[in-house]
Amino acid sequence: MKVKGKYMKSILSVAMLAVALCGCTGKDDTLKMITEATFPPYEFLRGQEIVGIDVEICRAVAQRLNRPFKAETVDFDSVIPAVISGKADLAAAGITITEDRKKNVDFSIPYVKTGIVVISKKSNLFQTTDQLKGKKIGVQSGTTSENYVLEQLQQEPERSKSPAEAVAALKAGRVAFVIADIDPAKNCVKGDDELALSDFITSEEYAVAIRKGQPELLAAINATIAELKANGTLAKWIADFTAESDSLKDK
Ligand code: GLN
């Protein structure tokens, strides 16, 4: 018994030493971001890599926390559920702060003021919201644009997986108008003489969303965003990723 006890003790100390040496506690320390990479310049694919303003914001949070970082892309309507279930730590996908979403997640301080716009064909140019009534309107599923059609227009939208897919439906004549956030909308319309963009029809703000009840993580995100705003980094990322996603379109 004595020998066995000694034997066990040394196995234990070797195991503890191994843990201390490689720093692997068995717990994955990676800060996981969940996003939806069809939303330039906030998130888009550069080859296989997910890049964009939101990715850099989340990477900066990981750096502040000294944790490895990983980004993953899913459909937009699965982004918020992924942080609620704990599959991911940070949700950033041009997510608008809404009262409804606030019931399920905590939001950081906002990092961009923005809104949605109407994309129309110049041959059927959008001028007033009365034109939208009773028409087929393309939106990305799960977005504030979808809510606009459901709540303000009291009708069913035509749902797509991405703003670009909705715009393809507009060009093919399957929908009369598309509603989308201004920046991806600008990206879709760029270089297309057939299409036009309206002014904002809503006023919205983007923020990072996390599972409720994590005040330390929320404070780290807020401090990161405040710093990136104050030192001009955020403005630079907005300019750089807008230019990059526009140029990817030209290819
Ligand atoms: N800002 C919009 C929303 O939160 C759209 C976001 C998106 O499609 N990535 O619903």
Image (tube, helix red, strand yellow):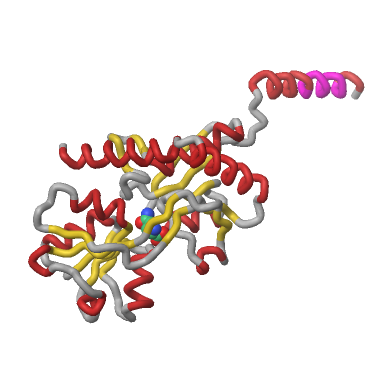
Above-or-below relation of 3 to 202 = above
The answer to which image quadrant residue 141 occupies is: bottom left
Of all residues, the one furthest to the right in this rendering is 2
Q: Quadrant of ligand 1?
A: bottom left
- Residue 130 located within the stretch drawn in magenta: no
Above-or-below relation of 162 to 222 = below
Please say whether residue 76 is visible from this viewpoint: no
Judge left or right: residue 11 versus residue 107.
Answer: right
- Between 147 and 23, the one lying in front of the other is 147
- Between 204 and 138, the one lying in front of the other is 204
Estimate the x, y position of residue 38 in percent, counting from the top left. Answer: 31, 49
Above-or-below relation of 50 to 169 = above
- Between 127 and 117, the one lying in front of the other is 127
Estimate the x, y position of residue 78 in percent, counting from the top left. Answer: 43, 57
Estimate the x, y position of residue 64 in percent, counting from the top left. Answer: 59, 34
Q: Residue at x 14, y 58 (%)?
A: 195
Estimate the x, y position of residue 17 in percent, counting from the top left. Answer: 73, 19
- Residue 5 located within the stretch drawn in magenta: yes
What type of secondary structure mainly makes up the magenta span?
A: helix
Q: Residue at x 60, y 30 (%)?
A: 66
Magenta-tinted stretch: 4-12
Q: How many marks?
A: 0
The answer to which image quadrant residue 76 occupies is: bottom left
Q: Residue at x 16, y 37 (%)?
A: 251
The image quadrant where one finds the N terminus is: top right
